[in-house]
Amino acid sequence: VVHHSDEKPTTPLPLHHVPIVVTFGLMENEGEISAILDPSEREEAVMSGRISFSINAHKELCSIHKIGGCPLSPQRLVKLGERASLRGAEVHSWMTSELLNADNKA
């Protein structure tokens, strides 16, 4: 149900429950696998695979989605998850700051 702001006071968007998706493009070259954070369209055209992590504001893993045939060792998977957690925290902090700025301007 959507209410008009004249009928009911607005409530802020609860960002702590919104998962942030961080994607790595995986490229395989002579047995070596490189991971590219948030690949561009050109990079996606030559990727061998991709892995996406959904992370919430509390750095909790919500989901993992892996596409493609690039094999990842458990250790590499953990390292990518840790990097995704850091990036998710950065994006969440930025979103929170931008929402506060927008509220102050409104």
Image: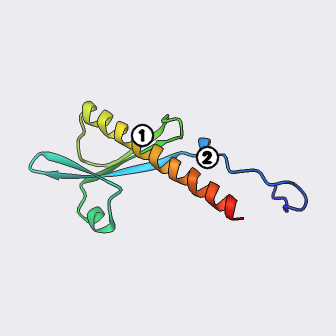
Q: Nearer the viewer, residue 76 or 9?
A: 9
Question: Seen from this angle, which residue lies furthest front?
Answer: 104
Q: Is residue 74 left or right of residue 54?
A: left
Question: Do residues under tags 1 and 2 come within 8 Å of each other at their CB atoms?
Answer: no
Please tell me the numbered disc located at residue 93.
none
Q: According to the image, label 1 marks what residue?
A: 85
Mark 2: give few (<14), some (14-19) or many (20+) Cα within 10 Å.
Answer: some
Quadrant (top left/top right/bottom left/bottom right) for the N terminus: bottom right
* Corner quadrant of residue 53: top left
Residue 101 lies, with reference to residue 18, above or below; the image says below
Q: Position of residue 22 (x, y in %)?
A: 41, 49
Quadrant (top left/top right/bottom left/bottom right) for the C terminus: bottom right
Residue at 64 percent of width and 61 percent of height: 102
- Coloration of the structure image: rainbow
Please tell me how many numbered marks the rendered image carries: 2
Residue at 68 percent of width and 64 percent of height: 105
Mark 1: secondary structure: helix
* Corner quadrant of residue 83: top left
Q: Earlier in the sequence, mark 1 or mark 2?
A: 2
Q: According to the image, label 2 marks what residue?
A: 15
Question: Seen from this angle, which residue lies furthest left?
Answer: 30
Mark 2: secondary structure: helix
Find the distance from the CA under tag 1 to the CA under tag 2.
Answer: 15 Å
Q: Amino acid at mark 2?
A: Leu
Q: Position of residue 101 (x, y in %)?
A: 62, 59
Q: Position of residue 97 (x, y in %)?
A: 57, 53
Mark 1: give few (<14), some (14-19) or many (20+) Cα within 10 Å.
Answer: many
Residue at 53 percent of width and 35 percent of height: 58
* Corner quadrant of residue 104: bottom right
